[in-house]
Amino acid sequence: MEFKKMSWVLAFVGFMFLGGICKANGHTHYYDFVLTESNFTRLCETKSILTVNGTLPGPTITVRKGDTAYVNVHNQGSYGLTLHWHGVKQPRNPWYDGPENVTQCPIQAGSNFTYWIIFSTEEGTLWLHAHSDWTRATVYGTIVILPALNTTYPFTTPDAEETMVLGSWYKGDVNEIIENALATGGDPKVSDAFTINGEPGDLFKCSSGNYLISLLQKTK
Ligand SMILES: [Cu+2]
């Protein structure tokens, strides 16, 4: 009798375990984003900017279609802000979408918040960025969503892949620029340079990163 009961319990546990495995479609990824002020030199001037993990551009999230990511944002900066996963639809999950004061309060300085990001139908390369005032000028990175396992992109596999993020560089404090514009009612000043992967390129003095982009037709 005892043995019979025991085998029923084991069968039930086994069923639950298998059920858990079968339900999981896609992997779960964990990231830590530490928002911190770091010194960067561009256009021959050094200034402190808010970064993710001290890099410009910030990190790349790499997942597959159907995966889930948890991004724990530790705000070690000096003001509250949010992060947004640009182009990720987040079905029935708006509370982790990121627009400040729309779907969440800012993550206060000195605190942390974990975003739950559900990748459903997206495939390709998207963008992540801060969603509070002009913090987005320096807090940004990329999201690479590979096709689900055993599937491919709807085009021939390229010979090589390189991620490029375009940005703008402003001399001075980016939040001061927008605050001044709001206070005066005028337009904010235009950016001092455009950047590719955080570098203005050799049209500007003191640049270290250059890009030569050529599109080549593959001959058979
Ligand atoms: Cu966006």
Image (tube, grey):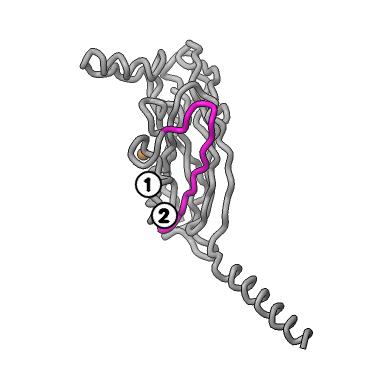
State the mark number for residue 122: 2
Identity, as a three-letter code, of the amino acid under mark 2 = Glu
Between residues 126 and 113, which one lies in front from this camera angle?
A: 113
Magenta-colored span:
106-122
Question: What percent of the width, then of the height, locates residue 123?
Answer: 43, 54
Marks 2 and 1, how far apart in space? 8 Å
Which image quadrant for residue 81? top left
Is label 2 in contact with label 1 (beta carbons under 8 Å)? yes
Q: Is mark 2 within 8 Å of ligand 1?
A: no
Residue 73 x %, y %: 53, 36
**Whether residue 211 can be seen here:** no
Secondary structure type for disc 2: loop
Residue sitting at 43 percent across and 58 percent down? 120
| Residue at position x 43%, y 16% in the image | 204
In the rendered view, would you say 167 is above or below 24? above
Secondary structure at numbered mark 1: loop
Which residue lies at the image location 50% right of the left edge and 41% below the top edge?
A: 162
Q: Is residue 36 above or below residue 10?
A: above
Q: Choose top left, top right, bottom left or bottom right for residue 188.
A: top left
* Residue 64 colored in magenta in the image: no
Q: For the residue with label 1, is its CB less than 8 Å from the closest atom of ligand 1?
A: yes
- For this rendering, which residue is in front, 34 or 106? 106
- Which circle marks residue 87 in the picture? 1
From this viewpoint, is residue 78 visible? Answer: yes
Residue 36: x and y, percent? 54, 25
Q: Is residue 120 magenta?
A: yes
